[in-house]
Amino acid sequence: MASLRALMPALANKTYFNYGGQGPLPTPSLEAITASWGRIQELGPFTTAVWPFIEQEVARVRRSLAAACGVGAHRISLTENVTSGCVLPLWGLPWQPGDELLIGDCEHPGVVAACQELARREQLTIKPLAVQQRCRSTPQAQLPEAALAAVEQALTPRSRLVVLSHLLWNTGAVMPIAAVAQLLQGHPRQPWLLVDAAQSMGSLPVAEAAATADIYAFTGHKWCCGPEGLGGVAVSERLLEQAQPTLIGWRSLAHEGSAASSFHRDGRRFEVATSCLPLCSGLATSLNLLEAEGTAEQRLARIQAGSARLWRGLQGIPGVQTLLPEPPPAGLVSFSLEGRSTAAVVNQLGEQGIWIRRLDDPDCLRACTHITTTDDEIDLLLEALSALN
């Protein structure tokens, strides 16, 4: 069987470190999408014959995602992306004026903006949760305890929601989601826990975190190397009891033919209407290809080997400062280059066919190593960065 890397034509003509933005689509996944389109047209896009095929493909990807998240399939909602996975259940929760949202200072702007608008509409209060500096100054072994302490110190009697990513998209640190969830259960108001899993799904073992969060939202197009336009969210049992749909369509209904129907009691209540079914076939194939490369723990070990090699190499380049004081716990390696514009560095490397990205907060560069990243690629990036000085 060909290696996953050999199945990705996008990696044949470039040195790619942007898995945290979008992962390359393997050829078998593209073929699965095309075959799915063809099958739908053969059966007829709106015929009695096509529905069993559609139900089969939707169920297949839902089961795969549920297995990765360590939850029952009834707790999975299929969405377009991470943001919709966060927003659709979040906005359906019962809020009261004065409720407090505790938001980590390493969260993605899309999620922060959604929370800000929710706060405006519902008269809620937003309070920052300082974790970035702890990530940059605390050894990995002590970081879970330090992050948990930060949450505990920031909680107040009005706290109703904590927003904290599993794998921080800028620093590359891993947050102790299960421990945070346990802490919140001891709070008088038992705040909900929303987790942005954009960087963790497909790169980390996520079952423990996904099973304990109230909202664990992810996408298929980053580390899972699936097609863009399809993601999901694992929701807790209590959220299914407490939250109502916000964007409503026929897929939200237990009986799609009647507006008088009640909503689904499971995760489907947060699904809306017609989606691109062939994407399910593509993502399910990508997930199978990842599983063929080893367990989540085995894949993480390979990812860590690459990120550690890159992190250690960066220490020997004058003017480079890595955001984390130790090799990263996953595949995100963020760093700055003294005296150099981050945007200019990205452009210069791109001219050489080497692709990394810049981030705004903090202003830094980020390179991602996946199981498909080779030692030669890492060394090539290090050589190119050294030549910039």
Image (cartoon, helix red, strand yellow):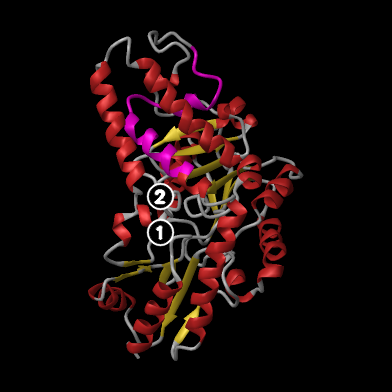
Residue 160 can be seen in this image: no
Left or right of residue 87: residue 188? right
Query: Is 220 colored magenta in this rendering?
Result: no
Numbered label attached to residue 164: none
- Amino acid under label 2? Cys
Query: What is the quadrant of residue 22 in the picture?
Result: bottom left
Residue annotated with mark 2: 225
The answer for how far apart the CA atoms under marks 2 and 1 are is 8 Å
Whether tag 2 and tag 1 are in contact, CB under 8 A, the answer is yes
Q: Which residue is drawn at 57% across and 58% down?
A: 300
Q: Which residue is drawn at 52% across and 65% down?
A: 172
Query: What is the quadrant of residue 364 in the picture?
Result: bottom left
Residue annotated with mark 1: 19
- Of 8 and 207, nearer the camera is 8
Left or right of residue 230: residue 161? right
| Percent x, y of residue 165 | 54, 54
* Secondary structure found at label 2: loop
Of mark 2 and mark 1, the one earlier in the sequence is 1
Left or right of residue 67: residue 365? left
Query: Is 273 colored magenta in this rendering?
Result: yes
| Percent x, y of residue 339 | 36, 88
- Amino acid under label 1? Tyr
* Secondary structure found at label 1: loop
Task: Please provide the residue range marked out in magenta.
Answer: 262-288
| Percent x, y of residue 365 | 40, 73
